[in-house]
Amino acid sequence: MVAATGRRIVRALVGGVLLCSLAIPASFHSVARSQSASSVVDSGILTLASSGSATDLDPASNEFEYADTVERNIDETLIRLAGPSLGSYEPDLATSWSSNADKSVWTFRLRHGVKFHTGRCCLAADDVKYSLSRSVAANLAGSYMLGRFLTAKDPSSQIKVVDPYTVQFNLGQPTPVFPAAIAQDYNSYILDSKQVKQHATKSDPFAHNWVSAHDVGTGPYTIQSWQHGQQMTLVRFADYWNGWNGKHFGKVIISTVPDAATRREVVEKGKALLTFDLLPQDVDALRANNAVKISSPYATQIYYAAMTEYGPLASPLARQALSYAFPYDALIKGIYRGQAKRAYGPIPSAILGYDSNMFHYQTDVAKARQLLQQAHVPQGTTLTCAYDTGASPPEPQICLLLQASLAPLGITVKGMGLSTDGQSNLYYGNEPPSRRPNIEVYSWWPDYNDPYNAAQTLISSSQAAPNGNNLGLFRNTRVDSLLSRMKNADTSTLVPLAKQLQDLTGRQDPPAIWAAEPQQTVVMARNLQGYVANPVELRTFYFYTMHL
């Protein structure tokens, strides 16, 4: 499996952008030709000031939230999460779904008359079978999501076309979490299979290179133009199956504004209706601005500092010591200005199975000193701490806080600043433990509401880099056994197992310093309506529900 390369990292790169790039055209003519003008109330243009740019639109490989915002609007899944809910679903390309008694076979009945942006009509079960088996068989970054349920060798063998509008998944064992995986908005999108197949080549059998740059979906918006690294323009898809009655934006401009201060400025001046990824001090300042409103819910993102299981941090006692040494209050109250809360393990607090009564590390320098001595980590030891130099708080600050807290204990922390690409190459490279940083700061959130999905990529031995997000190459046979039992367990079995997992990795044998769960702050024009935040659909936006 090709490793994920940073979908879950928060980026707020420093740099400038010309405000004129956000200028809104004087007028816009509706593209909804198939409906009468009276049925559409055009809200005009929504401009999103984004901290990063889409680079890859292929659901089988895209791991960045910037492209995911585009995919959520041009592509669709069989079912989708219902608004802010983590456990309720609503029809999307499927009108209904059901399972057999033991939930090993799932059947979806498709919507009729769905037109692709390519012009082809209509969506059929063959498109579903090809799209979802392709997401696994292509063996790209997102293959693990559905590969949990479908065999990588021949995923299509488990997907049956019952009739042109009915598709059935035979998973071979009870799988109650399958609807959550089908509803996730990363690699469960349905594409125009005929178009994709036409662009396949011997060297690129799944047409990844072509799909990554083309719109072959069914969603409410389609791509009008794309200036890579600068701006993408989406326009209303006239033949969208759900129609355009009521208030909607006719055009959406996603403009790349790398600098956080500039993003604040453009939303304050009304040059953009929507932005995110601002600095904590800017968020506080904007609370007094009556022209904007702020949404700051907690979600499922965890910031953590992975500790490489080698050398001075090979012992669980040494990793416990660093967990005691870390100044959590300085991070939460100082760096975040209260816009975050503590993380206590690999499972975010909003996810099923989270144990609110689990052990909580608190800063205790004396305890840290004692454990370092027991672990035979001598004074004078130097630890390297890697972070992205262009990342927003708290990546660099976590290394600085560790440096300050460990210095009185005779431990030197040497910061290792990396470019975004450099960080990805190092974190997901093949370097042995001896050549990896001792500490690697990172961020992740789950694909859907399931403790196995949340934890597995972070702490399973099988997910040791470069295979996944187990950056410290952590190995614990008890953890692997618990994850194996959690994989397809029902809720009554899953939750107790998740609690055991949290005790192991949040107390006894911590693979990381579990640092923070930040608020997911979005700043928007006060008259913008219809924004919906979901705890697992982070840092992305669904424009169809928005209007003025």
Image (cartoon, rainbow, N blue to C red):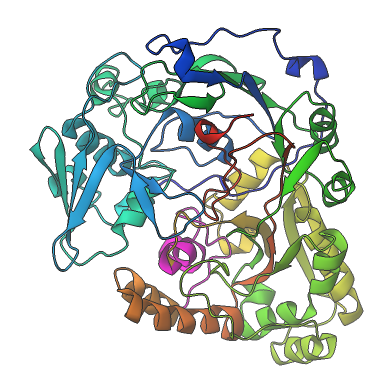
State the residue in front, 249 or 178.
249
From the viewer's perspective, is 375 left or right of 96? right
The answer to whether one can see residue 327 in this image is no
Q: Where is residue 410 in the image (x, y as percent from the top left)?
A: 88, 78
State the residue in front, 175 or 165.
165
**Is residue 121 placed above or below 380 in the rendered structure?**
above
| Residue at x 16%, y 42% (from the top left corner) | 167
The image quarter containing residue 522 is: top right
| Residue at x 79%, y 31% (from the top left corner) | 267
| Residue at x 45%, y 68% (from the top left corner) | 451
From the viewer's perspective, is 325 left or right of 175? right
The answer to whether one can see residue 352 in this image is yes
Magenta stretch?
451-476
Q: Which residue lies furthest to the left in this view?
A: 162
User: Is 10 one of the magenta-colored residues?
Assistant: no
The image quarter containing residue 359 is: bottom right
State the residue in front, 249 or 165.
249
User: Is 464 one of the magenta-colored residues?
Assistant: yes
Count of marks placed on residues: 0
Q: Which residue lies furthest to the front in this view?
A: 38
